[in-house]
Image (cartoon, helix red, strand yellow):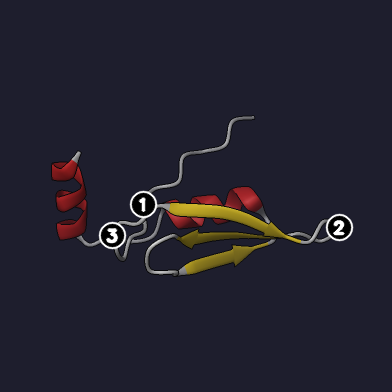
């Protein structure tokens, strides 16, 4: 299974970083490398889906598309 691409941080546009705490009962983390906002969850796929589906301000989306 391929790892889905995480979208940029909805608050600052920073690059998201995945990490995990624990082995037997892991907690998965997605954290912004710029502003530090993070989401935690026990289900990796659900956490990635939640990160990618948060509401993003239209101005940030437009700015990110223009930068590419």
Tag 1 residue: 8
Q: Position of residue 53 (x, y in %)?
A: 41, 54
Residue 24, labelled with which disc? Answer: 2
Secondary structure of the residue carrying tag 3 is: loop
Secondary structure of the residue carrying tag 1 is: loop
Q: Position of residue 56 (x, y in %)?
A: 28, 60
Q: Position of residue 16 (x, y in %)?
A: 45, 54
Indicate the quadrant containing the C terminus: top left, top right, bottom left or bottom right.
top left
Judge by depth and name the residue closer to the eye, 14 or 57.
14
Query: Who's the residue at 36% across and 52% down the image?
Result: 8
Query: Who's the residue at 43% across and 51% down the image?
Result: 52
Secondary structure of the residue carrying tag 2 is: loop
Tag 3 residue: 56
Q: Are marks 2 and 1 in contact (CB under 8 Å)?
A: no
Q: Are marks 1 and 3 in contact (CB under 8 Å)?
A: no
Query: Who's the residue at 38% across and 60% down the image?
Result: 54
Q: Position of residue 57 (x, y in %)?
A: 22, 62
* Badge nearest the viewer, 2 or 3: 2
Give the mark nearer the N terminus: 1 vs 3: 1
Alpha-carbon distance for marks 1 and 3?
A: 10 Å
Rate crowding at label 1 as few (under 14), some (14 to 19) or many (20 or more) other CA atoms within 10 Å: some
Rate crowding at label 3 as few (under 14), some (14 to 19) or many (20 or more) other CA atoms within 10 Å: some
Alpha-carbon distance for marks 2 and 1?
A: 29 Å
Give the mark nearer the N terminus: 2 vs 1: 1
Q: Residue furthest right?
A: 24
Question: Is residue 4 rendered to the left or right of residue 28?
Answer: left
* Badge nearest the viewer, 1 or 3: 1
């Amino acid at each position: 299974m391929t790892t889905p691409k995480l979208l940029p941080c909805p608050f600052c546009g920073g690059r998201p970083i995945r990490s995990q705490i624990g082995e037997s009962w892991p907690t998965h983390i997605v954290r912004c490398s710029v502003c530090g906002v993070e989401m935690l969850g026990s289900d990796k796929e659900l956490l990635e889906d939640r990160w990618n589906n948060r509401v993003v301000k239209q101005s940030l989306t437009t700015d990110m598309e223009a930068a590419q």
